[in-house]
Image (cartoon, rainbow, N blue to C red):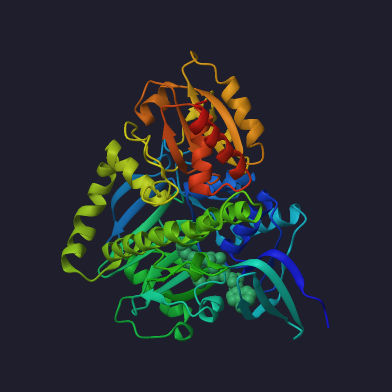
Amino acid sequence: MKTAIKTDVIIVGAGPTGLSLACQLIRYGVDFVVVEKKEGVTAFSKALGVHARTLEIYEQLGLAERAVAEGTIAAKARFIEGGEIRGEVDLASVGKGLSAYPYMLVLEQSKNEQLLYDYVLAHGKDVAWQSELATLTQDEAGVVVEIKSAAGETRTIEAKYLVACDGAKSPVRHLLDLKFEGSTFERMFYVADARVEWEFSHDALQVCLAKHSIVAFFPMPGENRYRILGSFPEEFAKNEGEILYEEIESRIKSEAGLELDISDVRWFSTYKVHTRHVENFRKGRCFLAGDSAHVHTPAGGQGMNTGIQDAYNLAWKLAFVLQGKAGEKILDTYNAERLENAENLLNSTDRMFNFLAGEDWFMNLIRLHLFPQLAGRALGIERVRKDFFKRISQIGINYRRHALSRHDGDGDFAVKAGDRMPYFPADGASVYDCLREPKFHLLMFSDGASDYRSVRAEIESEYADSVACHVVPLYSTVAEIFGTNRPFSVLLRPDNYIGFISAENSPDELRDYLIEFVGYAENQSRITERKTLRDFVGV
Ligand SMILES: Cc1cc2nc3c(=O)[nH]c(=O)nc-3n(C[C@H](O)[C@H](O)[C@H](O)COP(=O)(O)OP(=O)(O)OC[C@H]3O[C@@H](n4cnc5c(N)ncnc54)[C@H](O)[C@@H]3O)c2cc1C
């Protein structure tokens, strides 16, 4: 009998979520095993939209440049109704000033998976392909799973934690007996990658609006190549396997209401989705991430991006606990933060879908007659533009109401604990350039009058393994974004969300945060000693 494989984390599933988690765990030096029942990364384009927040995460991995080079920036959206262009919006720099990636990138899921898989390989790790999780048990000490290979052999893997990144039908979710709550109504979508000959230039996302349905054409690399994505109306009763491509093509043509010729179809598929999320992203030592934890319509292209960010949120917490730098309770914040995000996501994608393809007559009126003309003008308004970009790109997600956000010092600031670190250019570069180390980051914004050397030296000697310190000039953009001209400091979690903001620049605040909020274990006794001395002797 073969001995069990031992590791820290078992990742089930090597889709974009599982591969992202693997990449993040590599950054933190955590040992893991990824098991995947398929033979390799997907060959299908599936999800297409890569948003700014995901590109910021890719940037930390050194993958953003390649992603942007391989993808296409959606420069414009053109709204077509009844065969006529009804309106156009400029998307090329819709997020100007908000991110180093102020656009939506069109890059197929297959290429995202390849990018992430190449990172895994480049760091000496691999995926156990053709390995299917068959059983799972857990107790207080760890998780044990049995894996079946394509040849029918079984292996046992023992780990401290397991993360289910095994997709919408998630066998792990079933084994854990977790409810997947939401609508029972399934919506059917079709997708096709094809060449389209028509009168429109290849530089825009073309959205054809029709009564009760929608069909969108995403420009892809290659002459006149598009990903076509559409939905079937609610009353459509067929199942996935029963639909022929011809039926989809005639639907595309009638809904687009245009003279167009579709050829060289390289892939087409239909898929159904509910709108659901799991009741809890954690059960014991097992966690769920990506489609195993939430599914929704493709409106806004959020699915793949959300899975990548679930992984990003969880990775540092697992790493810190495994390395003894955080208490176990920090793991509960994963469920709290990402469950709230999933609930909001389901609501917003449902609203977006109902607006774009719903049955309501009033919405139809707005969608077909007002929206195409007004959308461009609305995005011309600074506030609307920023709000739109923050929502669609996921940079606006915040964890303000959650346990890792300490608010006692942020009252006077325009930015709050729990927000993503706002982007700003610093000396021609991006502030994110100095935030790549997988640690907490203490940013001390200085007006040049104070000397931070001793604070910095103290923190760096005490927390060398978990906190990086930076002294940053208080640029006018920083003053504007944070709403202050005075020096202040910001503690960023390793996923670049703000832990606290403070007008003070003292190591004590950092120590207290790490102990109270993070459960920083190693220094606990030393700090208690310090507090005791201060309390009793007054030093
Ligand atoms: C045809 C199609 C088109 C889509 N188009 C869009 C789109 O346009 N926009 C959008 O946002 N989203 C789209 N999606 C959804 C998007 O693909 C998902 O949101 C995304 O794939 C989620 O990634 P994931 O890694 O969480 O799950 P998945 O990509 O589903 O990966 C899960 C992995 O787990 C593996 N697995 C499952 N069970 C086991 C087991 N027992 N043992 C080992 N491995 C296992 C599976 O083989 C799979 O590789 C589309 C999906 C499909 C199917």
Please say if 28 is above or below 336. above
Front residue (pair 294, 25): 25
Residue 379: where, in percent of width, then height? 30, 42
Q: In this view of the protein, can residue 169 be seen by the observer?
A: yes
- Residue 381 sits in quarter: top left
Which residue ends up furthest to the right in the rendered image?
Answer: 1
Which residue ends up furthest to the left in the rendered image?
Answer: 362
Name the side, left or right, on which 167 lies relative to 252. right
Residue 476: where, in percent of width, then height? 41, 21
Please say if 236 is above or below 535. below
Q: What residue appears at the point 54 percent right and 16 percent down from the top-left corner?
A: 451
- Residue 184 sits in quarter: bottom left
Q: What residue appears at the point 26 percent right and 70 percent down from the top-left corner?
A: 212
Residue 240: where, in percent of width, then height? 46, 82
Which residue ends up furthest to the top in the rendered image?
Answer: 449
Q: In this view of the protein, can residue 266 be seen by the observer?
A: no
- Residue 420 sits in quarter: top left
Residue 80: where, in percent of width, then height? 31, 57
Front residue (pair 230, 51): 51
Please say if 41 is above or below 326. below
Specify the quadrant that holds the N terminus: bottom right
Front residue (pair 58, 270): 58
Q: In which quarter of the image is ligand 1?
A: bottom right
